[in-house]
Amino acid sequence: MKILNLILVLTGLVTLGANAQDKLEQDRKAIKSLAGFYKVNFNYGEVTSPNPDYTFSKPYRSHGNEWAEIIVDEPKRIVIQHMLAIDDTTVIKHWRQDWTYEDTNIMLYTQDNAWKKGNLTAADVKGKWTQKVYQVDDSPRYQGYGTWSHVGGHDSWSSETDSPLPRRESTVRKDYNVLNRGSRITITKDGWMFEQDNKKVLRTPEGDKVLAIEKGYEEFTKIDPKKFAYAQKWWNSQNGYWADVRIVWADVIGSSDTFKVKTMANGKLLYETLFTLGDQSIKEKWSAVQNQEKVKTALQPYLSK
């Protein structure tokens, strides 16, 4: 009887391990399906406010052609770089999303372009994926973690975390300083949906005050890859430089428990500085060592404790 019980226990453990591995592969497949060639529709609008006298902002709508390319594919880490294809001669390196499995390392946004290291345990992130989102200049934007669900043939993931103001409002709004993002990603037959329930928060030493609640929808619909021929050519020439930029940023983020990023220094925006260096690197054929040295030096005026 004891031998039989032992066999049953071992069989159960093997089955649990196999199921966990199957779930991990389902997760990886869903994440990798975020890559592709898309037309993206951006729709955001404030829907309610705790303040009856609040003046609602105008809804925001935009669209563009976006290519999302997998640049790192490891068993527990998948990195997807986005590029906006404006026309046949213009491309903008856009946001980046790093997906990491059961990752206890996380940077939490506080306010005013400042971050601090979070304290996560293995239990906090068991079976979960962290989505780490980065700006066009590869500085951190926000990081949240959650569980991928695969029920009834539907793949989805959700999280909630604080972030800086969205770019569409950072230059025109001064009445709040934190966007609390409630994010849901759902894979669709034609691409994927990035749905958001956001709180616009004024954070002060006295606490948080919610100004308004916002709904957001970013709909990624697959389109003809031919529209991205120039973007692919541009990225093929630039990807080595940006790999070195990511290495420098990883050192910056890993070397301190807190840090703050200035968007402007010496009269230039951070992304302008790094994009200019990228063009120089290609023109002058810099090595990886040169790239990293020049990027590290260029970042210093933009960083503070």
Image: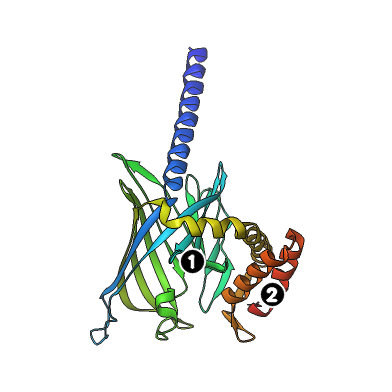
Q: Are marks 2 and 1 in contact (CB under 8 Å)?
A: no
Please state which of residues 120 and 28 is positioned toward the viewer in this rendering. 28
Q: Nearer the viewer, residue 185 or 79?
A: 79
Using the image, determine if residue 205 lies above or below residue 105.
below
Q: Is residue 181 left or right of residue 11?
A: left
**Residue 90, image x and y in percent?**
48, 67
Q: Residue furthest front?
A: 88
Q: Nearer the viewer, residue 8 or 190?
A: 190
Mark 2 vs mark 1, CA separation in Å: 27 Å
Q: Amino acid at mark 2?
A: Ala
Residue 208 seen anywhere in this rendered image of the structure:
no
Compare marks 2 and 1 and give the one earlier in the sequence.
Answer: 1
x and y percentages locating residue 75 in the rendered image: 56, 41
Residue in the picture at 69% in, 75% down: 298
| Mark 1, residue position | 89
Q: Is residue 62 left or right of residue 276?
A: left
Residue 145: give its label: none
Q: Would you name the residue on which mark 2 appears? A: 298
The image shows residue 249, relative to residue 129, as above or below, that is: below
For the C terminus, the quadrant is bottom right
Left-right relation of 81 to 276:
left
Location of residue 106 (image quadrant): bottom right
**Residue 60: x, y in percent?**
31, 74
| Crowd band around label 2 with a 10 angstrom C-alpha radius: few (<14), some (14–19), many (20+) | some
Residue type, mark 1 in image: Thr
* Secondary structure of residue under mark 1: loop
